[in-house]
Image: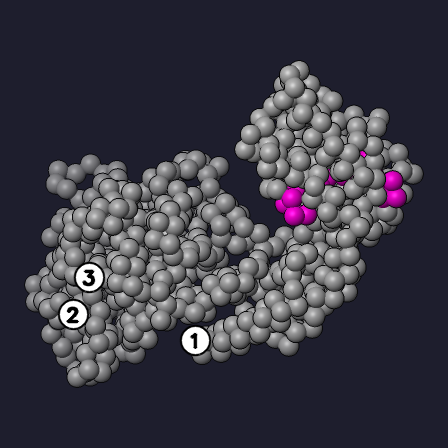
Amino acid sequence: MTIAVAMSGGVDSSAVAAMLKQEGHDLVGLTMQLWNQRRLADKDGMPEQVQGRCCSIDDVYDARRVAEMLSIPYYVVNHQERFERDVIRPFVDEYLAGRTPIPCSLCNNHLKFDQLLLTARQIGAEQIATGHYARNEYDPERGRWILKRPADASKDQTYFLFGLTQEQLARTLFPLGGFTKPQVRELAHGYGLALANKPDSQEICFIPGGDYKRFIDAYLEEQGEAVPETAGELVSVGGQPRGTHEGVHNFTVGQRKGLGLASPSPLYVISIDRERKQVTVGAEQELMRDSLRAQRVNWISVPGLAGEMRAQVKIRHRHEPAWATLRPSGADEVEVRFDEPVRAVTPGQAAVFYAGDEVVGGGWIV
Amino acid sequence: MRPFLVGEFGNASSIHQEGQHARAAVESARASIARFVGCRPAEIVFTSGGTESDNLAVFGSVRAGDHVITSSVEHHAVLHAVERLGERGVEVSFVPVDGQGLVANEDVRRALRPNTRLISVMMANNETGVLQPVEEIGRIAAEAGVRFHVDAVQAAGKVPLDVDSIGCQLLSISGHKMHGPQGTGALFVRRGTRVEPLFAGGAHERQRRAGTENVAGIVGLGKAAECAMGSEAAERMQVLRDRLEMGLLEQASGVNGGKAPRIVNTSNLWFDSLEGEALVIALDLKGLAVSSGAACSSGANEPSHVLLAMGVSPERAKSSVRFSLHRQTTEEEIDRAIELVSTQVVRMRELSAVTS
């Protein structure tokens, strides 16, 4: 049986390849070409090219070298069109609609565990292995594949994986789930991988320098589209005008910096109303919410939600899960009532439900 | 080649005896290449390959204010060179091709302007193998008194080359496309045709290409040209290529450029509802090396500009795969390839049907 390893040229996926090779598996290395970093390089404020970013020639070179060293066949597959359609475009549209998107989840759902898995199967592999920090295992009693948090809680990537279907989980290996990041670096050293000390990637892979506002401007310019006019008012929770802003996509719920308002106490973005082009600002306690609704829910450890269910819920990647009660509130939709109010519920982000280490499911916050 | 790689390191431009020996080998290779394309030895300039030959022909012929005509299916070595000229104040015309990938003579004639300096059209396309009517274009160029460059990189070794019957002033060939070494090539430059050198440096190659000669490579290129002449391999390759196409058409949906005259070793097929890229990988893993599209810097595939220029839909372009034969390809290999491709295509189609 052949396993396709999704290789990014980073430490984690390289260690996965080395580990599986050591175990004697038949491997093929695949790198997805998702985005051309030079495409927007001539646009205002965009850097020429940033070293060592996702899909850069450097990373492909690193991945190729690892594959060469491990004597495994290696290929770069072009999924740029799909990435633009299913990740870039929704990313831009979400911001323009006043929401805060998670491109990594979209990429997992549409590229890594969909398109790449299909490519892997077409070329004759049965499974794919990735360098994600997560665990998955089959539970015969429930008859379901279960996604679990990894040994290294600080690297937990399950928040970005809530969209995986049973079919996808059945065909996926997360060999790093039982290791901590320092252990993985150690392993990489042990396997003689030259890139064992390569720094972790942090920001959104297609946004060099991390300035998403510039990226949106540059992308729309390239597409020959005008940036929609969404400049409007900053208002208080009570509706009083507090100032003006230059477009709703410049804001995210909970944001403090860049409001351009003088105030004796700190002000935060409380909510964004795309229709009225209004951004509501207020004190920190006004950010607290005791419920949310999540749509397009995907279930993992359970087939669905019949009645109420207790779970811990994460509303952003870096968020301590909070106890809540889940209740079905429509087709593929869940209402989440928190025991204690949570700060900055952000439309566009995901609400992911946990039962201990298990991911129960998750959906998109509206 | 071997002696010049392991012991004889004389510089062909030097006075000493080692140098003279190298010079003799280079000149003998030059004579072989000259026979191969039907010209005088002095009309051959050795280069680092097809790309350099094409670049020397294009950049060496044209300056700001001139007009260049080329086709939309040229190799990037010509296409990108001409595009760059376009950014430097040269007028450029890209003549289209029809659904089979053929340039129409009349389009070339119509594109002529009073300041047209160069027409550059390839002899055989590297992706489809389609042969352009270069002799007729040569006549149009001659009537108009315009310089004519033929990129014969893909054609060399598969069809006889004769620069006089083509009527060109410039013609490019490349070593590795004719069983010669990689990184070697030549440009035929007709006597009296001045090309501005690409490199500043010594007076090598009659001041047309500065830089110490790649003696081993040049010797290899000369030998490859000798081997390619008078060989009956072409007929055999055509029989095998047709056998391959016949076999593959059970699964393939058609031949891109199949109705046009083609060189004997190339077959560009499309497979409806299949990712050409995945098929290429699946076949490579089974030991069959084929290609699709053009490789970009990272190695990922881009949709073929040649197929798109033929008016092929992007979907069909992405489902297209190029099969190439060489002179040593055997009938057994062809039959194995047919079986292998059929198995993989059937399997992949089933998979796509289930998952989509």
Write the residue at 61% across / 42% down: B181
Query: Which chain is mark 2 on?
Result: A
- Amino acid carrying label 2: it is Glu
Write the residue at 13% across / 38% down: A264
- Amino acid carrying label 1: it is Thr
Q: Is residue A284 left or right of residue A170?
A: left
Q: Is mark 2 on a helix, strand or loop?
A: strand
Q: Is residue A96 above or below residue B25?
A: below
Write the residue at 77% across / 53% down: B231
**Where are the magenta residues, as a range?**
B163-180
Q: In this view, does A19 lie above or below B107?
A: below
Q: Which of B344 and B328 is in front in this view?
A: B328
Query: Which chain is mark 1 on?
Result: B
- Res. A145 in view: yes
Q: Nearer the viewer, residue A227 or A184?
A: A184
The circle drawn on residue B355 is: 1
How far is the residue under mark 1 from the one under mark 2?
A: 27 Å
Q: Which residue is disc 3 drawn over?
A: A177
Q: Which residue is disc 2 drawn over?
A: A358
Q: Do the residues labelled 1 and 3 touch (CB within 8 Å)?
A: no
Query: Which chain is mark 3 on?
Result: A
Q: Position of residue A285 (x, y in %)?
A: 11, 52
Q: Is residue A240 left or right of residue B294?
A: left
Q: Position of residue A246 (x, y in %)?
A: 36, 43
Q: Which of B112 and A340 is in front in this view?
A: B112
